[in-house]
Image (tube, rainbow, N blue to C red):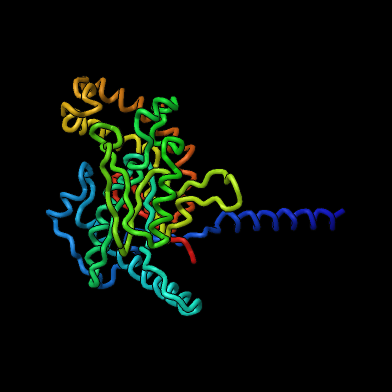
Amino acid sequence: MTEWYYHTDMAKYSTSTTRKKRQTYSPYRRLTRRQWAKLRASTPLTLTSDELEELRGLSTFVSMDEVVSIYLPLSRLLGLYVIAQQQLYQATDRFLGHNPPKVPYVIGIAGSVAVGKSTTARILQTLLSRWPDHPKVSLITTDGFLYPNRVLKKKGIMHRKGFPESYNQKRLLDFVRSIKSGRFPVHAPVYSHLIYDILPNEYQTVDQSDIMIIEGLNILQRGNRQGPSDLFVSDFFDFSIYVDATEPNLEAWYIQRFMRLRETAFRRKSSYFQSYANLSEAEARRTACQIWRSINAINLKKNIQPTRERARLILKKGDNHLVEQIQLRKL
């Protein structure tokens, strides 16, 4: 009897230890802000305060210290990755004995509404384009691949704008596939946040880029495959970044942004949301809160947040909108 209890206790201990190991294992290396900042090494600061003011748009939270501590180390890391990728391509070309067309290094940036994806993308675009060899860096947002409002209304999903089904996924996939096949120029539709719709007959032309940044809510999502050869946009990414924050912070930042827009863009005659400019402050806050909880929070939990662990790098923001922790996937 004693022996039975001994083995039972050992089994419990073994199971507990195994569970603990599983819980502590992570495919990521976690670094604090201070640890990450030291990895900048000698990477030069090539961005001025005036330029940063233009790049951050509605975001008043990105300081020059954030650029130095977070974005310069990231620029250095990406530089090393691009060189390694080029060497891999060259090795493959030597093996195959041919010289294929040059293809850009593609970086995907994902995250919630109001987390600061666009600012991150713009800052990275500027820093990467100022490397010593002056690469051509293009930036595309997936907003341009949303269906036009008339199509969304016809489908009955106007209220689900930003959800995966509101995008022309085939057109987006064909665009990225063309880029990684070396077929240039390629054209991306243009979206206007002011009129809240695709601009008809307007396109952004991308021609022979060295680096391509693609920014969007759901770009890391992988749905159900329709067949063995089906591809997803993220299959063509060489590097991916997820900008992360807690849901309470995201909601607060969304409301703050809504209130700033109420005083600026919403007041323009051509604005789709002009009616919001006439709301009282209390009404505007209630409206922003309702939009967040009925649309953005649902999209975040169901579609965006589950893709976080597919990213190569996670930038975790704290209450003050500054990146506090960096998670880099182990190779």
Task: Report whether 229 appears left or right of 235.
Answer: right
Residue at point 16%, 49% (across, down) = 54
Q: Quadrant of residue 136?
A: bottom left
Q: Would you say residue 245 is visible in this rendering?
A: no
**Residue nearer the viewer, 97 or 71:** 97
Coordinates of residue 267 in the picture (x, y in percent): 16, 27
48 sits to left or right of 250: left
Residue at 26% over, 66% down: 135
How far across and down, in percent of the image, does residue 204 sit? 27, 49
Residue 39, position in %: x, y?
32, 68
Is residue 277 at least partly visible in the picture? Answer: yes
Return the residue nearer the eye: 119 or 226: 226
18, above or below 148, in the image: below
- Name above or below for residue 238 compared with residue 254: below
Q: Is residue 128 above or below residue 244?
A: below
Residue at the (36%, 63%) spot, across then down: 104
- Give the number of marks: 0
Q: Residue furthest left?
A: 50
Name the spot of residue 290 as percent of width and height, x first.
36, 25
Say whether residue 182 is left or right of residue 46: right
Q: Residue at x 57, y 53 (%)?
A: 229
The quarter holding residue 10 reads bottom right
Q: Nearer the viewer, residue 275 or 313?
A: 275
